[in-house]
Image: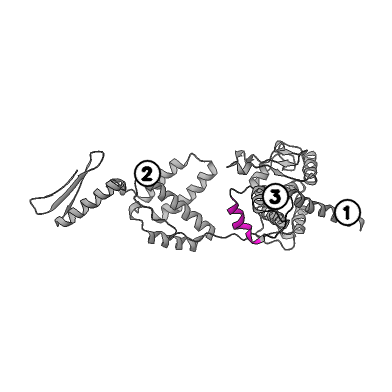
Amino acid sequence: MANIEKRPDGVWRARYYDAAGRQHARHFRRKVDAKSWIDEVTASIVTGNYVDPKVARTTVSDWCDSWLVGYGTRRKSTVRQAAVHVKVIKADFGSTPLSAVKPSDVKAWTVTLGERYAPSTTYAMYRRFAQIMSDAVHDGILQKSPCSRRTSPPQARQRPHVATTEQVWALHDVMPAHLRVAILLGAFVGLRVSEAAALRVQDVDYMRGVVTPQIQYPDVPLKSEMSMTAVPMPSELALLLSANHAMYGGTTVVTAEDGRATTPYAIERAIRAKRGQVPGLPEGFRFHDLRHYLASLLIASGLDVKVVQTRLRHATATTTLNTYGHLWPDADESSRAAVAVALNAREDSSRTAAGV
């Protein structure tokens, strides 16, 4: 219900009642302006785009706080990352009403982000803001999100450093003895550092030659079923993992010197300390680059994108292609055989050195 009436002072009052029976009114000098406002409100109600004026005054900061509370049901690491993004968003938009944020504001914001952060971080910040604004629309406190393809910064394209087989083995040799198995898990199984640190002995089937990661450090279930995909390994690698366990014991495959579980930080710290001893490895080489080596090894052996996606446990083949598409040759062999070739090359080299 809506109406327009003229007050004694000559001002036109336009008012309407929302679905909850609350009255909303505004005053105008001209009747045509009052009617235009009523028509606009009526149209928004009919189309389902109506937003309570009081709710529309919600600031970005207030909505971020409410949004983060609802987001808290996810895993702790995910919530921590979201909280970091929200802190930046609140600092930059703060007291601005949600409805006052325009696409041009978002576009300008991404430019300033690019001056402060790396392209990947800028893109992640923007995606978080787009998610928050989209949820505001879904909750009915914002008519339309100011974020779209036109406001999005370019997504950073990763061109990873791919180590050679010789460099991988050289890094393996200079690592502390108890952490060499971590290099094997990264380069030949493709585990992420948090997965390698948490891999339990029970997750490795030495007889069948299968590694099935289940948790990540410290003891958190992996995010998706795809992350828990079993990864086959050749008998040569199974023997190396078994020998490591016989030497250090413990409940995890990668351990500290005393056989207790280690941490992702300890593994990365050791790589930072030793990578300078391997000719050709860049200063920024990290454990995750071992996954890139495995990807290049499988691709060079002719495996198709779906096999490589499965071995790396990517959520989609698109992720695999976006990261490694430039490496693809034409051939077709099994991933077990591809890893076995690299392992056998190591043994041949060792025998040759022993003979000399």
Q: Up-down: is 115 above or below 256?
A: below
Position in image of residue 316 (x %, y %) = 58, 50
Q: What residue type is labelled 2?
A: Asp
* Residue at the (21%, 53%) spot, across then down: 37
Q: Residues within 10 Å of mark 1 (few under 14, many from 20)?
A: few
Question: Is 287 in front, or is 316?
Answer: 316
Magenta-colored stretch includes residue 33: no
Span highlighted in magenta in the image: 316-326
Q: Residue furthest left?
A: 8
Residue 201 occupies quadrant: top right
Q: What residue type is labelled 3?
A: Gly
Q: Identify the secondary structure beneath mark 1.
A: helix
Magenta-colored stretch includes residue 320: yes
Position in image of residue 6 (x %, y %) = 10, 51
Residue 251 occupies quadrant: top right
Q: What residue type is labelled 1?
A: Arg
Q: Distance between the residues labelled 2 and 3?
A: 43 Å
Residue at mark 3 = 186
Position in image of residue 9 (x %, y %) = 8, 53
- Give the label, 2 or 1, closer to the camera: 2
Position in image of residue 237 (x %, y %) = 77, 46
Query: Circles 2 and 1: CB distance less than 8 Å?
Result: no
Q: Which residue lies furthest to the right in this view?
A: 355
Q: How crowded is mark 2: few (under 14 residues within 10 Å), some or many (20 or more)?
A: few
Residue at mark 1 = 351
Residue at mark 2 = 139
Q: Up-down: is 238 above or below 158?
A: above
